[in-house]
Amino acid sequence: MSNPRNDKWRPIVLRWIVILAFLFLGISAGYLQLVEGNEYFDRAERNVIRYITTYPPRGEVFDRNGEYLIQNRICYDLMVIPVETSKQGLDTLRLSQITGASVASLKRAFKDARATGRIASPVAKYLTAEAKLKLDEWNLQGFYTVPRTVRQYPRNIGGNLLGSLREVSREFLEHKNEDNYYIAGDYYGEQGIESAYEEELRGEKGRVRRNIYADHASTDEVEKEAVPGKNLVCTIDARLQAFAEELMEGKVGSVVAIEPSTGEILVMASSPTFDPNELVIGRDRGNNYMRLLNEPRRPLYNRAVTSSQPPGSTFKLLNGLIGLQEGVLSPHNRYTCNKGYRSGSVKMGCHEHRSPLDLDYAIATSCNAYFANVFRNILENKKYKSPKEGYEVWRNYAESFGFGTRLGVDILGERKGVVKHRDYYDKTYRRSWNALTVLSVSIGQGEIQSTSLQLANFAATIANRGYYYTPHIIKQIQGQDSIDIKYRTPHYTPVDKRHFETIIKGMWRGVNRDGTCQLAKLEGYDVCGKTGTAQNPQGDDHSTFISFAPRNNPKIAIAVYVEHGVWGATAAVPIASLIEEMYLTDTITRPWLVEHVKNLELDYYKAYDRHKKK
């Protein structure tokens, strides 16, 4: 029998037991949440997932013989994610000592980085492996390094041919980043091969997921492998390029040499040039770039493809070929030259030589009067209604040889030169003009301009007896069986092969017998050439020369253009001849001629050096 008093208290006791149990559970939960929970939260906060872009090594560039032209070396960028950094403050002085960056520049970088929040931003760039090791030992919270490749140029040649790398600008990202490949801090190729073959050289970025735990341990998961850039084999002969730049030192102009049977460019030298190592990504690049940019002789300017100048008497060969094909010229036609050409009020001077003369001798001696007659006969050909129609036919011939048009070389900045349309003369002379009006074109003056690349291609076309391959700089791309078919397709001119033999005979005579370019003679190689002296209103005339050798089965075609070089034979001929000798014989037997070229004193005061004391 139960006790009524106990029955009365039993529900009350049970109720308090339940209350106390819940109270204990609540206090425990509160303690875990409010006290120990902070520790778990802090641990969770310190567990970080970081996505890191991995940059592929940029493709390297070799010359035709396997020698490095552009090589990689590893450096590192120090990155920071501001929200992950320690709240204890940063020893910027120590960081400055390790990275080599100034304290002021580090503070600016941190300020810019804080504006990005959780996005990784560069703090210091181009760090050495030694600096990276020190940073790894320091183990700064919120900081990490990313490997990069920067360029180095073992030969120190071809600055404006090879190009350089530069950091993307805001304008670049907004207007030129079409495939969204680049982000702030990335580099891209500027000018030359670096720019023309940017997509092949840059490779593809990778991505790594890095899990960083509270104890600072980390694990990496590769989400996408970086794909290295493709290596390129260049058509350039590094030793020949270096020799050409050596000969052109102190001069303003350019040299282009081509292998006629392939269109491969052996030399593309522009003078003045610069050591490409001066523009390697780094702290001195900006200062070096501005110095080169402000240099009056414009070393950043690749004159071989971007400078248009009158071709001078080298252009007479084209008029001879057109005259032969049009039937208005025979190799045996003779014209008189009494120190020039005269017709009414039109006068064109010429140097003294034997007269009358045939085509062979006219080429060898570069007679102005002879080719004035030829040009006039082309335009006044009776099968055309007027000299204007004859000019249009003449212009079509010129374009078929690559004049007045871009050849399509695989390097940026190529200019098409100048061959005026008939419309230009109609507008300028109110439709009242004839062959005498444009007679200066007959000797490569007046409204005619060409690049050194076009002149070298012209020499290659003659060497091939009527066709050329599009000149190109790259011989092979890693992973590809062959270069683009457009560089393997011949372009034929409308001139019959037999007419080229006639012109070549005169070019051979000019070098090997009694012409204007006998200094170019190389025993056993039957060098063929044609000088040019282009009139220049700003000082001494320009010196130019085109050539190829040997006469049969030619291995090299070359054009040299030296501004203010006085005569074709003064500067351009010896430079071209020495380059041909080096390429064909692998040696130089005329060291006296090398010294002569190096010691040439040309006057650039009016054109470039007015700011200097004469």
Image: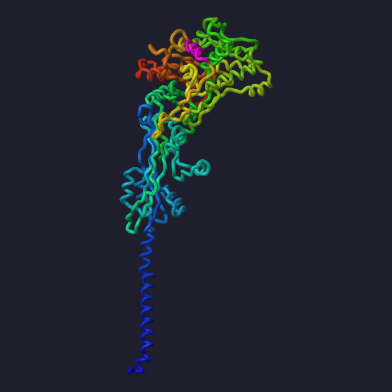
Up the image or down, 312 lies above or below 89; here it is above
> Does the rendering let one see residue 485?
yes
Residue drawn at 66 percent across, 18 percent down: 433
Q: Is residue 240 left or right of residue 356?
A: left
Front residue of 347 and 187: 187
Figure label count: 0
Residue 441, given in percent of the width and then of the height, sits at 58, 17
Up the image or down, 282 lies above or below 320; here it is below
Up the image or down, 258 lies above or below 71; here it is above
Magenta: main secondary structure: helix
Residue 573 location, quadrant = top left
Residue 147, given in percent of the width and then of the height, sits at 37, 44
> Does the rendering let one see residue 100?
no
Q: Which residues are magenta?
A: 496-505
**Residue 536 colored magenta?**
no
Residue 25, given in percent of the width and then of the height, sits at 37, 76
Up the image or down, 323 lies above or below 39; here it is above
Q: Is residue 153 left or right of residue 290?
A: left
**Residue 500 colored magenta?**
yes
Figure colour scheme: rainbow
Quarter holding the N terminus is bottom left
Q: Is residue 593 left or right of residue 437?
A: left
Front residue of 195 and 400: 400
Residue 325, given in percent of the width and then of the height, sits at 55, 13
Residue drawn at 36 percent across, 83 percent down: 17
